[in-house]
Image (cartoon, rainbow, N blue to C red):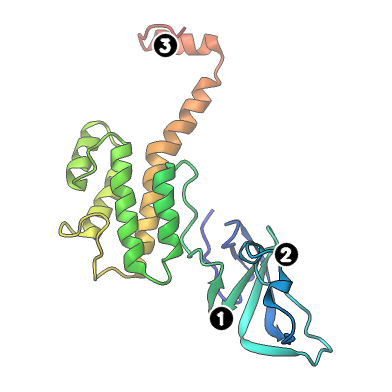
Amino acid sequence: MKYVPPELDLNAFNCPYCRAYAHQDWFAGGARHFARNLPMGAFFKDATLAQRHPPELFNTENSQSCLALGSVMFSKCASCNKVAVWVHDAIVYPQTGEAPAANADMPDDIQRDYNEASTILDQSPRGAAALIRLAIQKLCRELGQPGKNINDDIGALVKGGLDPRVQQALDAVRVIGNSAVHPGQIDLRDDRATAEALFKLLNLIVDKTISEPKHVAEVYASLPEGAVKAIEKRDGKAPSK
């Protein structure tokens, strides 16, 4: 399914919490009067609770103790029921970025770089692009290459029968990065469009090199033993034990 980034007033988009494409309910912002003699911590049972839960929505109708905030909006996801906070036209909570969710088969170390890049995409597209290039370098190592020179890695992978679409994706990363820019380094020419393209390319490369082979292997492993032996006999392979 196509990824739809969160956008002010859209009826549905991919939730910044659960990442599901879901309907969004919108609420106008407001502020409730806070008594001076009431400690701030009274709203939460402990200090960490405030970090785990987004601000609650509250009803401002028929209340003189509430203040309308025209620049603040709330969107509530119909899938996970969590609330995102908007100021003007940007999400300020949670700070997860607007990149598509990482491929579930992405190795953990690489996925951490991907998610960190997503978190800073709004604040620093250049930093996000640098992290994704570093993640792609790590992925080349996962695929059995040195991970030092992406051009050499691509050449070796091609000789090993790399899917032409993956080769094109890796070459696109190399060209977008420019040979003068090393993985993990900031390129002052990078912009948001560049960073978004790199997110998509990394997910595509993982899909073609890890997810698709994994799914094919799972289907093949589910075949009846007799069918597997017949296939192996046809191909001249030693029968599986």
Q: Give the amino acid type for the residue marked by disc 3 in the picture.
A: Glu
Helix, strand, or loop for circle 2? loop
Residue at 21% across / 47% down in the picture? 150
Task: Locate residue 171, reporting x and y percent.
Answer: 24, 50
Classify mark 3: residues with Cα within 10 Å, few (<14), some (14-19) or many (20+): some
Q: Position of residue 187 (x, y in %)?
A: 24, 66
Amino acid type, callout 2: Lys
| Tag of residue 203 | none
Distance between mark 2 and mark 3 Cα atoms: 63 Å
The quadrant in which residue 197 appears is bottom left
Residue highlighted by disc 2? 45
Mark 1 = which residue?
87
Q: Residue at x 40, y 60 (%)?
A: 117
Q: Is residue 219 visible?
A: yes
Q: Is residue 59 above or below residue 238?
A: below
Which is more foreground, mark 2 or mark 1? Answer: 2
Q: Is residue 164 visible?
A: no
* Relative to 113, residue 225 above or below: above
Q: Is residue 120 left or right of residue 223?
A: left
Name which residue type carries label 1: Val
Q: Residue at x 25, y 64 (%)?
A: 186
In x, y percent, where is residue 119? Answer: 46, 63
Q: Earlier in the sequence, mark 2 or mark 1?
A: 2
